Amino acid sequence: MSRVFAQARSGLVYAGLSLAAFVSIFPFFWMLVGTTNTAPDIIKGKITFGSALFDNITNLFAQVDMVQVFWNSTFLAIVGTVLTLAISSLAGYAFEMFPSKTRERVFAVLLLTLSIPFAAIMVPLFVMMAKLTLINTFTAILLPSIASVFIIFYFRQATKAFPHELRDAAKIDGLKEWQIFLYIYLPVMRSTYAAAIIIVFMANWNNYLWPLIVLQTNENKTLTLVVSSLASSYYPDYGVVMVATVLATLPTIIVFFLLQRRFVEGLTGSVK
Amino acid sequence: MTGLKLRNVRKSYGAAEVIKGVDLDISPGEFVVFVGPSGCGKSTLLRMIAGLEEISGGDLFIGDNRMNDVDPAQRGIAMVFQSYALYPHMTVRENMGFALRFAKKPKDEIARAVNEAARILELGPLLDRRPKDLSGGQRQRVAIGRAIVRQPDVFLFDEPLSNLDAELRVHMRIEVARLHKELATTIIYVTHDQVEAMTLADKIVVMRAGVVEQVGAPLTLYDDPNNLFVAGFIGSPKMNFLAGVVEQDRVRLPEFGNQSIPLGHLANPPAQGSEVTVGIRPEAFKRGGAAGLELTIEIVEHLGNESFAYARQSGGQMLTLATEDGRGLQPGQRIEARFDPAHVMLFDTSGQRIR
């Protein structure tokens, strides 16, 4: 009896998981199918592969300077990720390694800022950027994001697992603080960095609202803005939209699969 | 070889003073062990010598140079940590050679130094492994090897064997002693394990609450402690302490049915009627001693080579007796525990030794 019950239970579990997998994977499948179909077919709900892939790609490249757009997104995502990790991991390291009452208070205030929605600071931030004459520049995108409170918090928590005796050993071996950070902390915490790269890269790559406000000319537009404008045109060509969406999705998938193992280690706090 | 001098060395964290004026002379080539209970400041003092903690007051000399404000790497020291502190992303070879590589020494010199340390510690086959692939004992040997490679004037060991199991600890203890003999370098070694202190040290520094209680050779501390704390800390099992009152040339022991023991020969005997603490080591109880206490045995532990008997008189304080010929002892047995009065120590009410 109990065996039948166990089998039924595992059957239900598998059914649930299969449903979850279907819900997760089907949009990607539909996106891929969409790239090969014409807009009318897509609207009709066709979910088999068609023969319009080449036309859709040609149309996309005819409508948008994809090389420039891809370059813009890639530049912003990579430079933004590198700068965010450099600044925020240094801050997280410093908060943990040099504790003081004042720093704890500063840290508490920083954490409080996490509860302020972006919409609330959007207008003042825009005014600030305008006064700095940075509107329609990549600096306006990068500057507000490089000191990420969430990533500082994440690195501070991860640094708690970093053995402080390694720092002492490194000091005795003659390393200055920045060298300890560079030659000991960074390689030891590589899983933490990998997880942070994925989080920050995805956030930067998918960033929509702020670039929409700040980037005003076509040559500065990013992939998310282009996908959005293609989808919201009067007669959207969904085949073209799907090709652009695939292109927009690919880099995050590649980054995730490259760093997948370290991502899991980083989130589970493994320091070996 | 280099010695050290500490002059009124102090350490404070805000208003809390944790090292309260330490004066210490360490001769070149000496093996000095800092010992004391948890929180006594022994590791802090070692870290101050290493340069990992700032010195709040006083002077630290390594050789003839005042080192208070000198970088750790410039002090001529190397340190072995309790948790080994090996760089996990480097191989054993890279770990051992890291300091030299960082000091921009030539590659062949680094290789020679690493190979020599590996030879001394028999680490040859492990050189290309990473720390996670090593056992605890091997990691500790690598940590010692990393220290040797730097050819320091002074080795600092911070509870290096605490993370090892009992058998390995004995093995590594012998290794450390052998190493000291081979390298003949000054070693400062922190431990809370008094067996390590007794077996390794030329000189033991007993600390309590940031103060040096006594400095001396292991057997000097064992035979002639200055105070109750040192007498209780050095020696295993712990020394028995009995409350007593001086009456004429004897000490009456109220907790032992007012039995009394001879006062012994003292240069400065205590005043009549004064309260004292009598210290008798468990191993001081021997057949044929000139004095004795009547006791009833409650528990006996046979270790093979010796036996420990825990005995008292009618609900009073429990005494520990250690004897090599105690296999016949039984719980409930009444005995007269004999001892030599010359081995009895007296302490005044402030815990200081009466001599």
Image: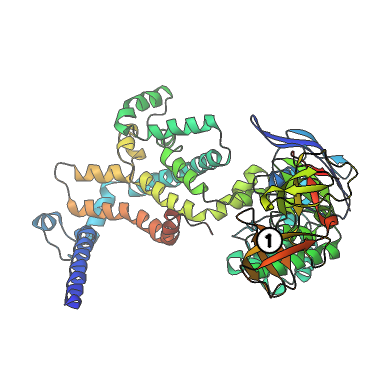
Judged left or right of residue A78, residue A16 is left
The residue shown at (29%, 31%) is A119
The colour scheme used to paint the residues is rainbow
- Depth check: B38 or B332 in front? B332
- Asked if residue A33 is positioned above or below residue A224 in the image, the reply reads below
- Depth check: B178 or A92 in front? B178
Residue A258 position by quadrant: bottom left
At label 1, the amino acid type is: Leu
Residue B74 position by quadrant: top right
Image position, residue B208 (x, y; %): 71, 44
Secondary structure beneath disc 1? strand
The residue shown at (21%, 68%) is A14
Judged left or right of residue A167, residue A26 is left
Image position, residue B175 (x, y; %): 76, 67
- Depth check: B230 or A45 in front? B230
Q: Residues within 10 Å of mark 1 (few under 14, many from 20)?
A: many
Image position, residue B275 (x, y; %): 74, 41
Can residue B38 be seen in this snapshot?
yes
For the N terminus of chain A, give its image quadrant. bottom left
- Asked if residue A15 is positioned above or below residue B72 in the image, the reply reads below
- Asked if residue A258 is positioned above or below residue A146 in the image, the reply reads below
Image position, residue B2 (x, y; %): 88, 50
- Depth check: B111 or B7 in front? B7
Can residue A174 be seen in this snapshot?
no
The residue shown at (79%, 66%) is B286
Q: Which residue is mark 1?
A: B295
- Asked if residue B216 is positioned above or below residue B123 in the image, the reply reads above
**Residue at the extreme right of the image, as rendered:** B267
**Residue at the extreme top of the image, as rendered:** A131
Chain of the residue under label 1: B
Judged left or right of residue A216, residue B172 is right
